[in-house]
Image (tube, grey):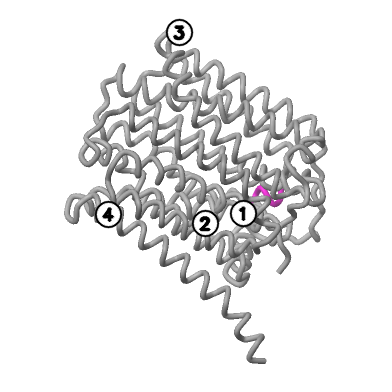
Amino acid sequence: MSSPPSSLGFRDVLKSPEVKRLWTAQVVSIFGDFLAVFAVFSVVTFQLHGTPVQVSMILAAYLAPLAIISPLAGVFVDKWNVKWTMIASDLIRGMLVIALLFVRDLYAIYGIFFLLSTVSSFYVPAQSIAIRTLAPPGGLLSVNALMTQAMQASQIVSPAISGLMVEALGPNSCFIFDIFSFAFSAAMVASLPIRRESAPAVRASVLRSMGDGFRFIFTHSVISFVMIAMTCGMFAVRCFGALLSVYVRDLLHSNATLFGVLNSLIGFGMIGGSQAVRSVARRISPQHIVVYGLAGMGGAVFITALFGNVWTTAVGMLALGFFAGFNMVTSQTLMQQETPQEMLGRVTSSLMSLMAVSQVLAMIVAGPVAQVAGLRNLYFGSAVMLLAVGATGLMWLRKPRAEAQAA
């Protein structure tokens, strides 16, 4: 199996005007999204005095379409014009955010988030196709790493900026910036020459196209491996992350400031991991990087649960982010490289769906398990799951080598 292209560095791929424009659109759009999301949480929490259940429903409303609609969206993305799909998605989402300027009703906010996520179900697989199309030869891994870094950098700085904007200018200032960010992204995408290879013309129903996508996933060993690894990893990490605030309160006996710092450390770790993955990919196969990334994440969670003090938790959060960055960038690149371009929308959407389902299940499971078995035991369980998936993946990778030696 070929390794993902990794010969070009970050400066090299940013010399491509097309990659630079797509990356700039990602930076501005993601930053605007995070500003708006944190502003919505502020509105529901402090203006509408929402209960914990009402606040958590914001995330549930956003995850539901990703879990349910994504596989269907991928079928259409594989048939539609990629550039116009991205532009239309940006403009529609911008118009939906305009509604947030005037709405202060909980159920209306849930509805807007549901619709935003539905449209995003089309945008994300289209962007994955655009990345593969625009990345220069030898630069796919670096382009994916840059996209991941843009998201993590925004996640680090946007909470504080959003809080300042909400306090000084009101939540609508964040929504206005997000509207601008969608318009900016659409304009940048409109300037890109996104021309994917044409697939053979096949007249197939939506259900048959969806079935073809699932059949490809289940019969392709590398894609199946990436799907299982990412889904299990997301489930374990979400079990851990869903109750991190409770861990800070009850085991570390600290406050919201430390909780915010720990979340930022995860983001810094992910940026470091996505920076380092290119040099590691020169010496280790991408499948092994995914396995070692899962094992590293498990080790980070295990250290956090074992010692239970502020300093080891800080180290654990940095390590968790670092190895998660390894995992995410390599998995995305593997998926883009191994999937035929005419199926990339369906494969990307299927991964989105599985990731969303795993997050919802984790949030449902984490609370009751922690209440019965204890929070620290839940964390140990998450660590064991990550380590077990990594060990299983390592045995899976060794099997072809053992068979080749026996032959």
* Residue corresponding to mark 2: 293
Secondary structure type for disc 2: helix
Image location (x, y in percent) of residue 47: 31, 16
How packed mark 1 is, by other alpha carbons closer than 10 Å (few <14, some 14-19, many 20 or more), is many
- Of the numbered discs 4 and 2, the one sitting upstream in the chain is 2
207 vs 362, left or right, is right
Q: Nearer the viewer, mark 1 or mark 3?
A: 1
Between 120 and 268, the one nearer to me in the picture:
268
Q: Nearer the viewer, mark 4 or mark 2?
A: 2
Image location (x, y in percent) of residue 74: 61, 51
What residue do we see at 75% from left, 44% from top?
A: 9
* Distance in Å between CA atoms under marks 1 and 3: 40 Å
How packed mark 4 is, by other alpha carbons closer than 10 Å (few <14, some 14-19, many 20 or more), is many
* Distance in Å between CA atoms under marks 4 and 2: 20 Å
* Residue corresponding to mark 3: 169
* Distance in Å between CA atoms under marks 4 and 1: 28 Å
* Residue corresponding to mark 4: 378
Identified by mark 3, the residue type is Leu
158 vs 236, left or right, is right
* Main SS class of the magenta portion in the image: helix
Say which quarter of the image contains residue 387.
bottom left
Q: Which residues are magenta?
A: 75-79
- Of the numbered discs 3 and 4, the one sitting upstream in the chain is 3
Is 106 located above or below residue 61 in the figure?
above
Q: Nearer the viewer, mark 3 or mark 4?
A: 4
